[in-house]
Amino acid sequence: MKLLNPGPVTLSERVRAALQKPDLCHREPEFLQMQRRIRDRLTDLYGCSQEYASVLLTGSGTAAVEAMVGSLVGPNDKPALVVANGVYGERMAAMLKRHGRHFEVVTSAWTEPMDLAGVAERISGCACVLAVHHETTTGRLNDLASLGKLCRQNQVPMLLDAVSSFGGEEILFEEWNLQACAATANKCLHGVPGVSFVVARRNALQAPGHSPALYLDLHNYYELQEKDGSPFTQAVQACYGLDEALAEIRDQGGWQARRDLYRRRAAQLEEGLARLGIDPFLREGRSSILGSYRLPPGVTYAQLHDRLKEAGFVIYAGQGGLSDEMFRIAVMGDLTRGDLERLLAAFPTE
């Protein structure tokens, strides 16, 4: 079965084999050496300066986002500013509400780009900006260059949900004035679910923490991981997979090569669907990692999903009010050109 949902992904044989390594206690030096290596590889992937460090968590990408939000957004007089144009921007606002933080939201429709004019009007009075890089609700790659410029000009730090872009898209830590970004192993890095991470400025991780949580307190993780420790049990086998996945992406040319691979796959898929009369849902601002497409006339998502699953592929539904209009296909993971040709051949032709 080939997974075309936006994570988890179909594993390479190299990563799958790494999961078979010996059982290991997370308190033993062998694990702690691997933890240090993973943390270094995560920051090396984007050439981060020593001002940044990564923190490993056992949990999903959402756990990493909530750890970042809960630990780094304090009870300030100034509000945090959430820029939302999809499910995941709205989810960060929901996290802030749960944590009792002062925040405002600049909202766009799920089908529209970020409202940068609205951000420009309100950013000077804000403590930080929270945004989503790749909004998989529709497959939109948000304009982080423009948003980052606003953050830098106004000296407002950004907290970025990079869960579905880290490893597959450009992330400019300094230029976008990133205080932190949250991501996961099981999307563009091609690891397995169970381990996620936050890459953040050391001075933010060393400052007094704000987290109302025990388990998701980034400052505690950072302090102990800097001493080659771990506050809680880590997902050892998932870490084996991430360690190997990071070595694999390095050997294959880094995030730039992976982005190029996704672009080729996305072009092949889009061209093939166009021949079948299936149009992209977004006309501009689309990522190469995931595409959203209009359902063929007379075909429900359930019918399309089941037909393609019988052929060996798992696709993904639209969310919320878009569920009756579109379907989504991600091109992450261990896929070949032949796989995508087989997928296209399995689509209904009438």
Image (spheres, rainbow, N blue to C red):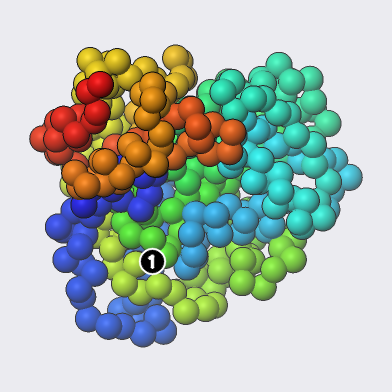
Task: Work out whether residue 258 or residue 346 is closer to the camera in this orientation and state it.
Answer: 346
Q: Quadrant of the C terminus?
A: top left
Q: Is residue 20 left or right of residue 78?
A: left
Residue sitting at x 21%, y 59%: 15
- State the residue at coordinates (45%, 15%): 284
Task: Looking at this view, name the residue that lies furthest to the left.
Answer: 338
Residue flagged by tag 1: what amino acid is it? Arg
Q: Position of residue 97 (x, y in %)?
A: 78, 51
Residue 29 is left or right of residue 107, and the answer is: left
Q: Quadrant of residue 93?
A: top right
Residue 228's spot in the image, x, y percent? 45, 74
| Residue closer to the observer: 99 or 244 | 99
- The residue lying at 24 percent from left, 28 percent from top is 348
State the SS at label 1. Answer: helix
Observer able to see residue 200: no
Count of numbered circles on the image:
1
Residue 212 in view (yes/no): yes
Residue sitting at x 66%, y 20%: 116
Q: Nearest the camera: 283 or 200?
A: 283
| Quarter of the figure with residue 338 | top left
The answer to which quarter of the image holds residue 216 is bottom right
User: Badge 1 is on which residue?
Assistant: 36
